[in-house]
Amino acid sequence: MHYPDGREIELGDLVWWNEGSCVGRIAAIFESADELSHWGLDEYGIFICNDVTENWGSCDIFYPRIAFESEGIAKLTPPEIDYVWQVRDELLKTHPEILTYESFGLRRFCDQNGDARWKLFPIERSQGNDLPNMDVGAPGGPPGGGGSTQ
């Protein structure tokens, strides 16, 4: 299976999703009729894990192949990956409490002024996702922007 830009999708890829606003990892790829049947799915596609740490592995959200382009499903480029880790590191400096959680996700959005902001959110699988978000501004955005196919 391939991204809209033609690159091959691989397990563990860091990707943009949710219209290019969130970063996650490819957790599962469904390309065979047996896989679809086993999971009770009707369409070929991928599962994305919200977790950007090395603890990833859950299948949090499914995207059918037909929706990849409209949902901004794209593999992060090396400069985007570097930028995302820089943002993560800066957010962890200002919110060290996030380190008490085993896993966390990262979301990019624009504030009322159109400035890029990032949200770091803890993922506590045993308690659900009702934990506090760490909302922190970060100047600029990643090279190419979220969901870029460059």
Image (spheres, helix red, strand yellow):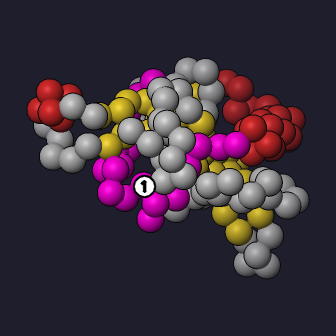
In the rendered image, residue 123 lying in the magenta stretch gets the answer no
Classify residue 59 by image quadrant: top left
Image location (x, y in percent) of residue 103? 58, 28
Question: For the magenta stretch, what is the residue range?
Answer: 57-77
How crowded pointer 1 is (Cα within 10 Å; few <14, some 14-19, many 20+) is rated as: some
Q: Residue at x 44, y 42 (%)?
A: 2
Q: Secondary structure at mark 1?
A: loop
Picture mark count: 1
Identify residue for label 1. 68
In the rendered image, residue 59 lying in the magenta stretch gets the answer yes
Image quarter of the C terminus: bottom right
One can see residue 98 in this view: yes
Image quarter of the N terminus: top left
Q: Residue at x 34, y 50 (%)?
A: 65
Image location (x, y in percent) of residue 114? 76, 75
Residue 58 is left or right of residue 34, and the answer is: right
| Depicted 111 relative to depicted 145: above or below | below
Between 106 and 71, the residue placed more toward the observer is 71
The type of residue carrying mark 1 is Phe
Q: Residue at x 31, y 50 (%)?
A: 64
Image location (x, y in percent) of residue 41? 17, 41
